[in-house]
């Protein structure tokens, strides 16, 4: 009797649990239905539309592929000197050294070079330079750079780096100053001089007057131009070597005026019927010897 009663109670308890589960499932179903109904109602409310961007400009084309020049790449002849290691090591604004003329091979210690003028013009010249050491330097300046004959080689053999430069019709003084500054990158910058002949003598005095790197000056057949006396005042007290033939009246008058205005040491060598400018050295070889000895005393 007690066992039947216990069994009946278990059945009732099980039925109660089943009803609880059914009610829970019913409530969950009802809740899901209500949520679906509410979400459906929200769809009827107007939503804010996010604006989209419309491109109105032209489509940008991809840029061309850029290939950087790598160290060791071949450089065309037109650009020789741009990556010159000596030039690359210079401070900003420094003068460019004489750079080898494209296609020009050195002939012993002599090579054709280009000097960059202040206006960017490439001035063609000849450089006589020993690679073993940095020597005192001399600029030879005349209308025709080939008129010096063997004299540049003679000066170089005496222990100097020599830069031979021709002259343009204008910018002569500025070109000489550029030549001195350029030579200072290849020669000893504290021992630089100039030898000017004819018009190159006038430009040499005017250029050295404004360029402190010029320590000694040789003038062959200078003129009696009025501006030269004023230039001597700016060049003083640096030393001067003067030479002219007696028949060249303008040069003799110019030398007299220069001597009168000079305050430094002046060496004057007159000649008779010896020519003009660079011809003085050709006609009087002893003049070349005098100039070399004078340079050794004043620049070495």
Image (cartoon, helix red, strand yellow):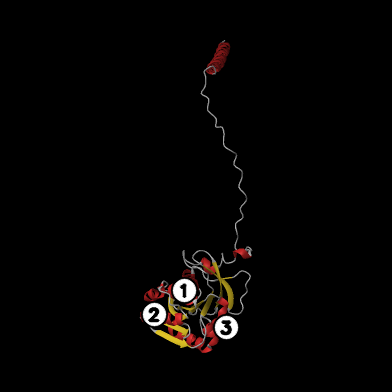
Q: Which residue is mark 3?
A: 150
In this rendering, position of residue 230 left or right of residue 65: left
- CA gap, disc 2 and disc 3: 31 Å
User: Sequence order check: which comes first, mark 2 or mark 3?
Assistant: 3
Q: Residues within 10 Å of mark 2 (few under 14, many from 20)?
A: some
Question: Which mark's residue is nearer the viewer, 1 or 3?
Answer: 1
In this rendering, position of residue 156 left or right of residue 209: right
User: Sequence order check: which comes first, mark 1 or mark 3?
Assistant: 3
Quarter of the image with the N terminus in it? top right
> In which quadrant of the rendered view does residue 5 lie?
top right
Element type at marker 3? loop
Is 77 or 295 nearer to us in this picture?
295
Is 33 or 290 nearer to us in this picture?
290
Q: Which residue is mark 1?
A: 203
- CA gap, disc 2 and disc 1: 16 Å
Q: Residues within 10 Å of mark 3 (few under 14, many from 20)?
A: few
Element type at marker 1? helix
Residue 17 to residue 275: above or below: above
Q: Which residue is mark 2?
A: 257
> In which quadrant of the rendered view does residue 225 lie?
bottom left
- CA gap, disc 1 and disc 3: 23 Å
Q: Which mark is residue 172?
A: none
């Amino acid at each position: 009797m007690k066992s039947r009663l216990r069994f009946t109670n278990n059945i009732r308890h099980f039925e109660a649990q089943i009803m609880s589960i059914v009610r829970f499932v019913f409530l969950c179903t009802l809740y899901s239905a209500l949520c679906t109904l509410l979400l459906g109602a929200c769809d009827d409310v107007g939503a804010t539309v996010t604006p989209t961007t419309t491109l109105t400009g032209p489509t940008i084309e991809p840029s061309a592929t850029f290939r950087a020049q790598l160290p060791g790449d071949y450089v065309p002849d037109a650009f020789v000197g741009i990556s010159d290691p000596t030039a690359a090591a210079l401070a900003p604004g420094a003068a460019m050294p004489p750079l080898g003329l494209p296609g020009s091979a050195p002939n012993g210690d002599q090579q054709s070079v280009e000097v960059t003028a202040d206006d960017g013009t490439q001035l063609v010249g000849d450089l006589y330079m020993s690679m073993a050491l940095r020597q005192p330097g001399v600029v030879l300046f005349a209308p025709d750079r080939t008129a010096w004959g063997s004299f540049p080689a003679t000066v170089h053999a005496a222990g100097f780096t020599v830069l031979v430069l021709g002259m343009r019709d204008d910018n002569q003084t500025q070109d000489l100053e550029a030549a001195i500054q350029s030579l200072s990158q290849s020669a000893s910058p504290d021992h630089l001089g100039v030898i000017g002949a004819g018009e190159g003598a006038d430009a040499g005095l005017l250029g050295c007057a404004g360029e402190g790197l010029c320590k000694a000056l040789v003038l062959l057949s200078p003129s009696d131009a009025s501006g030269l006396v004023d230039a001597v005042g700016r060049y003083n007290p640096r030393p001067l070597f003067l030479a002219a033939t007696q028949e060249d009246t303008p040069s003799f008058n110019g030398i007299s005026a220069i001597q009168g205005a000079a305050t430094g040491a002046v060496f004057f060598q007159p000649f008779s019927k010896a020519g003009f400018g660079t011809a003085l050295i050709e006609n009087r070889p002893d003049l070349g010897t005098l100039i070399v000895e004078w340079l050794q005393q004043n620049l070495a």
